[in-house]
Image: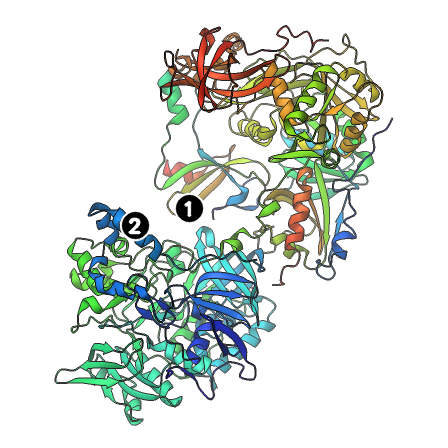
């Protein structure tokens, strides 16, 4: 069971209360980009074994999206931060 | 017939003042409260509980609990039926019925026993090999009949189920000496402690071992601990509760059983989160390998002690003991004290290694050292063992043999968390390796055999846990006066006897020779060995057999046990009933049914409901008794006078703020920046890949205030979609998204008389055609309450959709349905509603679109081309996939002969017979009363360029001819909805 | 003409379940059809609208997650960093919403009518929390959901607003269409063993 403390409402939330949003920091390109750049944006993800930056939503709680650094092997949550914030942990692994 | 097992005249923790009647394989037997089914069967002299899986060998009780590979039974108590339990897991209940799960016609006389004669065929890798040669089909019918454990029974289940969720500071798994001592030392710390014990009483092995603690017997000490802990308000103790799984973030699943004299009446599934975890799960004894080691009468040494001391049952009349550690001597002493005859203690070690041997010798028990059993004999029950020593071979008569090959710690829960057990060669056991943070391992589970060491450990762990809370409370150190279990033992390899007669895994009939064969054939990785031989794959999960098998493989491949390693431990620790997991999620509560606020009014009209997540009226029996007739009348009402349709499930999302119009425009194919107050616009919404996600109308209620109406099924998903983009992609846009679907009920009035019907509700605004034209919305008062009325149409007729707050819904619907005079309003169900829209060629997202359909495919290319600014999915419409000339495009179809059917495939050009290639399919179809033809919509390759073409469509088992047409079949000039 | 109003269940919960004999001693279950609601949702950061909102409603809009503030006519519950649930008598709903919407003509703060979105159920008694815990954790915190606080979570597999009103007194709000399901679910769990 993945448990994450939502940085907005401060509640510890269970997997049931959360929605997974895939890899974080995928920038949406302008319409003018090449077909290849656009399809990369649509489909290509890093899908690592290990440290992964991703989006989660406190969907059954306060409804807010936030970012998480998770180890995809152990499910350990290394950091959680709001969209308007910067993560120390994320910068270190980047 | 002589019986072997019997009830001892005294001793045990059973209630001898009361007798419980039960049945086993139809025989009427009796036991006492406090018995398990296993102990009661043994007390009644039942030797054979079942037959083995492959060779149908007779098998008796081998272990006292969940570790037993043999005693699989089907059990029916007063509350339900379970097809495959181990007898030691079952608390005896009055009137309980139990059956052997294999053996035909009976476990004692099994005709399948003849399989042993062809046992050479059934060795390791049997399945893998027969899939290749000679032919699986030769074996399949016979294998299918012969395999499986137990049968389900269609019986009424009266067991209650509950679920609980809880958070505690400390979870202690196991209520034996280690768990009790830890819990005791946490009293006063202010921590909330949860202790789970899978047996009905606390104490664990203290209930049957001869320990002396603080001057009391082990069981008396455990009872006094139980009393102390029960008085502590911070400690919660659950007995008969098994921790079945450990998951990430210290989340646990537990199953708690509640039982009475008649069986298990309730089960409670706990989901528990704990900050600290104390693993005090103890260990399980493991067997020794020797030829014919599976005869009834042979069992684990500790099981014999438990039978004697906990249940007052003697497993045999004349007991022999075979051991490579001191457990055997403890058993000899326990049996001796219980008055049983002891044939001999056979010890694989030399005399010097045996700590407890002196005492046995003093009691006149013959002890044979440096000895191995080289054969056993007996028909249906052990009769003799043959012991080989260096200089002698001795045949010993006995009807029971207690076996101990050492101990295996119950490391499972740590294994669930990915902690690999490590082999400790000093005690011959796999112990937990690196455990997760804030996990603490105490007692037998780390192969501690010395009780004082366990208590010291428990004190230290409690101290560590308390330290995090300011060190409140104080340690409790029990004094141990008598040690219990002697020494550990490394697994011993037999040097005599035939490996094809030595059983490693009793439940799956895996023999030492199977492991040798697998090793010869290269299956030397432990996970491969497991699957190739099925070692440890039974319901007992190889609790007794795994380490024996591993050590055999290690010896065969000249590796250490550490190098061989263990297989992966996965939840659950023991089987959980699916009904216990499902709990209330069955029948009506399986999935939340969503009801309209008007549900009762529809019921009064005898609506026939369909489940779309929402319970929606499909058609009304009040209109006609038969579906087609009712649907025809409902359609006619809309076309000729007025129909009333409940559209309450339609999504309603208020989008507000200075940037609301700009925000919405980024989602819809149509430009909503130009939408003026009181106006309504229809559009579709794409996902970023260009595929249609949803459609619906957007209304502008006032400046900066919009109402989006997604489809019923997508209402929640669309609101979440808006919110996600607002937060993650466009956080600076000034917009708020408020889903308000359930607050409003929406009743559509459709038909030429819709305006007259709306007038009956006395709206406080002008509803004339000039003042309130098509595709507009008004806010005001209707029926004396605040309302929103949209003039939109899904049917092609004049249509008003009246929304009021849900508390007025029933009153609104009843009022319009009972309108008097010449209006004759009729309730209209979803089927008629969808056919009406099909006549008009309107899109039904999800039916007429699929996971590939873009707006270009449904004729919205012009609108897309006009958009200057970006919207979600726009860029994808320029990709080759979207612009290909081979796209399936939405068109109308009119049947020239026969009837169109949804799903009918369009035959490729030039083909008239199936099988043949196809180029699309029918997405919606019905007979249209207004057009007088069978009509449909279809996605057909290049459909937009093929107007008028006749195609063959496979419908009703035969190709029919259809003409491709404009999808608007009814009133193509929109005269009626403008009226 | 005036349409008639009807409660969500249309039955008197006060008597029915208790008489059925299933509810543990001292427990009470009551439908709260008297609770009206307005949903307040800001298009901008909360700080920019709180003052105006307070003025229009006569209650301090709470900024702290999970907190509730009470005013003379209504109470405000923190729902998200930009949204609040305002509870008021049903008859005050329209007026309160209008006052907010009048104060924010540009819709930086929007008040949506919300009374009929939520069905409120009051659960009282020592075992109330245990009943709720059958449907979810209620709270994963050591001390649980504090009195005077509210949160949104899942109960019995559906979203709910839970308010811990007083000791042993809980108010649960669920989406109206799931009322019958939720009451059915409550009935299925009410006779849970203590523990």
Position of B34 relative to B240 (above/below):
below
**Chain at tag 1:** A
Using the image, tell me which numbered label, if any, was put on residue B405.
none
Report whether A92 appears left or right of C188: left
Please state which of residues B109 and C40 is positioned toward the viewer in this rendering. B109
Please state which of residues B803 and B521 is positioned toward the viewer in this rendering. B521
The quarter of the picture where the N terminus of chain B appears is bottom left
**Chain at tag 2:** B
Report whether B384 appears left or right of B456: left
In terms of image quadrants, where is residue B192?
bottom right
For label 1, the crowd category at 10 Å Cα-Cα, with few meaning under 14, some 14 to 19 and many 20 or more, is some
Please state which of residues A40 and B883 is positioned toward the viewer in this rendering. B883
Position of B620 relative to B966 (above/below):
below
Q: Residue B725: x and y, percent?
A: 53, 27
Instruction: Return the residue at label 2.
Output: B140
- The residue lying at 80 percent from left, 19 percent from top is B823
Instruction: Return the residue at label 1.
Output: A75
In terms of image quadrants, where is residue B773?
top right
CA separation, marks 2 and 1? 42 Å
For label 2, the crowd category at 10 Å Cα-Cα, with few meaning under 14, some 14 to 19 and many 20 or more, is few
């Amino acid at each position: 069971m993945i448990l994450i403390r939502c940085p907005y409402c401060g509640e510890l939330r269970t997997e049931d209360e959360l929605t997974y949003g895939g890899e974080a920091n995928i920038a949406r390109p302008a319409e003018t980009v090449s077909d290849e750049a656009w399809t990369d944006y649509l489909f290509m993800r890093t899908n690592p074994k290990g440290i992964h930056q991703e989006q989660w939503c406190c969907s059954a709680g306060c409804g807010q999206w936030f970012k998480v650094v998770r180890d995809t092997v152990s499910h350990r949550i290394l950091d959680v931060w709001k969209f308007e914030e910067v993560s120390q942990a994320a910068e270190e692994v980047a | 017939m002589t019986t072997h097992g019997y009830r001892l005249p005294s001793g045990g923790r059973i209630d001898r003042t009361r007798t419980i009647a039960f049945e086993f394989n139809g025989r009427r037997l009796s036991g006492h409260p406090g018995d398990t089914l296993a102990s009661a069967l043994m007390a009644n002299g039942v030797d054979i509980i079942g037959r083995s899986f492959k060779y149908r060998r007779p098998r008796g009780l081998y272990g006292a609990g969940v570790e037993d590979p043999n005693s699989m039974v089907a059990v029916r108590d007063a509350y339900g039926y379970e097809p495959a339990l181990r007898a030691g897991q079952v608390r005896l209940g009055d009137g309980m019925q139990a059956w052997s799960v294999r053996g035909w016609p009976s476990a004692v006389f099994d005709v399948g026993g003849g399989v042993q004669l062809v046992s050479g065929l059934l060795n390791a890798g049997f399945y893998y090999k027969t899939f290749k040669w000679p032919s699986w089909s030769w074996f399949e019918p016979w294998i299918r009949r012969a395999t499986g454990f137990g049968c389900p029974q269609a019986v009424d289940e009266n067991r209650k189920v509950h679920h609980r969720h809880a958070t505690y500071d400390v979870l202690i798994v196991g209520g034996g000496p280690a768990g009790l001592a830890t819990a005791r030392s946490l009293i006063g710390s202010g921590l909330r402690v949860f202790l789970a014990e899978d047996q009905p009483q606390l104490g664990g092995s203290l209930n049957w071992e001869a320990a002396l603690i603080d001057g009391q017997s082990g069981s008396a000490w455990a009872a006094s601990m139980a009393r102390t802990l029960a008085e502590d308000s911070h400690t919660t103790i659950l007995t008969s509760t098994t921790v079945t799984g450990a998951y990430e973030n210290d989340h646990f699943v537990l199953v708690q059983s509640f039982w009475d004299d008649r069986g298990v009446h309730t089960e409670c599934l706990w989901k528990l989160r704990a900050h600290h975890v104390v693993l005090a799960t103890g260990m399980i004894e493991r067997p020794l390998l020797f030829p014919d080691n599976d005869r009834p009468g042979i069992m684990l040494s500790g099981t014999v002690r438990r039978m004697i001391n906990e249940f007052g049952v003697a497993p045999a009349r004349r007991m022999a003991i075979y051991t490579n550690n001191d457990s055997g001597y403890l058993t000899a002493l326990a049996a001796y004290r219980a008055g049983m005859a002891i044939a001999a203690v056979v010890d694989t070690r030399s005399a010097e290694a045996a700590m407890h041997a002196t005492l046995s010798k003093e009691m006149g028990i013959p002890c044979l050292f440096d000895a191995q059993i080289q054969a056993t004999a007996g028909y249906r029950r052990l009769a003799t063992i043959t012991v080989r020593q260096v200089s002698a071979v001795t045949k010993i008569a006995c009807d029971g043999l207690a076996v101990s090959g050492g101990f295996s710690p119950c490391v499972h829960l740590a294994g669930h968390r990915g902690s690999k057990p490590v082999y400790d060669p000093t005690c011959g056991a796999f112990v937990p390796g690196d455990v997760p943070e804030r996990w603490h391992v105490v007692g037998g589970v780390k192969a501690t055999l010395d009780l004082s060491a366990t208590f010291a450990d428990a004190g230290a762990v409690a101290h560590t846990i308390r330290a995090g809370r300011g060190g409140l409370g104080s340690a409790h150190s029990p004094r141990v006066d008598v040690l219990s279990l002697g020494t550990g033992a490394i697994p011993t390899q037999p040097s005599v006897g035939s490996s094809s007669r030595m059983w490693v895994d009793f439940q799956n009939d895996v023999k030492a020779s199977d492991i040798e064969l697998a090793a010869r054939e290269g299956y030397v990785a432990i996970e491969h060995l497991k699957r190739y031989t099925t070692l440890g794959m039974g319901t007992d999960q190889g609790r007794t057999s795994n380490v024996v098998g591993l050590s055999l493989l290690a010896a065969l491949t000249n590796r250490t046990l550490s190098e061989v390693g263990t297989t992966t431990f996965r939840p659950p620790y023991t089987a959980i009933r699916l009904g216990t997991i499902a709990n209330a999620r069955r029948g009506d509560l399986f999935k939340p049914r969503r009801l309209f606020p008007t549900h009762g009014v529809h019921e009064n009209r005898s609506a026939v409901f369909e489940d779309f997540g929402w319970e929606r009226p499909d058609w009304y029996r009040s209109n006609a008794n038969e579906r087609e007739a009712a649907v025809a009348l409902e359609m006619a009402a809309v076309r000729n006078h007025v129909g009333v349709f409940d559209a309450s499930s339609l999504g309603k999302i208020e989008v507000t703020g200075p940037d609301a119009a700009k925000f919405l425009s980024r989602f819809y194919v149509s430009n909503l920046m130009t939408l003026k107050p009181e106006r309504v616009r229809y559009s579709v919404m794409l996902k970023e890949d260009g595929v249609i996600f949803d459609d619906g109308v957007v209304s502008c209620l006032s400046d900066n205030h919009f109402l989006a109406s997604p489809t019923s099924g997508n209402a929640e998903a669309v609101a979440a979609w808006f919110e996600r983009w607002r937060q993650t992609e466009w956080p600076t846009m000034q917009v708020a998204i408020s889903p308000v679907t359930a607050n409003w009920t929406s009743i559509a009035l459709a038909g030429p008389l819709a305006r007259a019907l709306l007038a009956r509700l006395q709206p406080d605004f002008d509803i004339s055609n000039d003042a309130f034209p098509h595709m507009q919305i008004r806010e005001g008062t209707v029926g004396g309450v605040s309302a929103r009325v949209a003039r939109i149409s899904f049917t092609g007729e004049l249509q008003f959709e009246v929304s009021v707050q849900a508390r007025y819904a029933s009153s609104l619907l009843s009022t319009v349905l009972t309108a008097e005079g010449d209006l004759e309003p009729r309730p209209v169900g979803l089927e008629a509603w969808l056919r009406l829209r099909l006549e008009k060629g309107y899109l039904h997202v999800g039916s007429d679109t699929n996971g590939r359909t873009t707006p270009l495919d449904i004729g919205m290319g012009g609108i897309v081309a006009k958009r200057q600014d970006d919207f979600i999915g726009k860029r994808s419409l320029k990709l080759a996939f979207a612009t290909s000339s081979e796209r399936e495009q939405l068109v109308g179809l009119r049947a020239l002969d026969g009837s169109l059917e949804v799903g009918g495939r369009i035959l490729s050009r030039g083909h008239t017979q199936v099988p043949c290639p196809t180029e699309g399919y029918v997405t919606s179809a019905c007979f249209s009363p207004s057009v007088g033809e069978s009509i449909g919509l279809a996605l057909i390759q290049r459909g937009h360029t093929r107007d008028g073409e006749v195609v063959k469509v496979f419908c009703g088992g035969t190709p029919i001819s259809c003409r491709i047409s404009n999808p608007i079949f009814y009133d193509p000039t929109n005269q009626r909805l403008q009226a | 003409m005036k349409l008639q109003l009807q409660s969500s269940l249309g039955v008197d919960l006060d008597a029915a379940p208790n008489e059925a004999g299933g509810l543990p001693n001292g427990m009470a279950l009551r439908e709260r059809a008297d609770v009206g609601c307005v949903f307040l949702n800001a298009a901008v950061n909360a700080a920019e609208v709180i003052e105006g909102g307070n003025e229009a409603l006569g209650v301090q809009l709470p900024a702290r997650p999970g907190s509730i503030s009470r005013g003379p006519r209504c109470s405000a519950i923190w729902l998200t960093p930009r949204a609040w649930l305002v509870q008021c008598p049903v008859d005050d709903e329209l007026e309160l919403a209008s006052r907010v919407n009048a104060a924010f003509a540009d819709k930086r703060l929007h008040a949506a009518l919300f009374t009929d979105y939520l069905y409120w159920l009051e659960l009282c008694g020592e075992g109330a929390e245990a009943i709720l815990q059958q449907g979810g954790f209620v709270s994963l915190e050591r001390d649980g959901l504090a009195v005077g606080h509210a949160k949104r979570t899942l109960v019995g597999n559906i979203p709910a607003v839970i308010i811990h009103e007083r000791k042993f007194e809980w108010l649960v709000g669920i989406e109206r269409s799931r009322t019958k399901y939720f009451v059915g679910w409550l009935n299925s769990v009410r006779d849970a063993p203590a523990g």
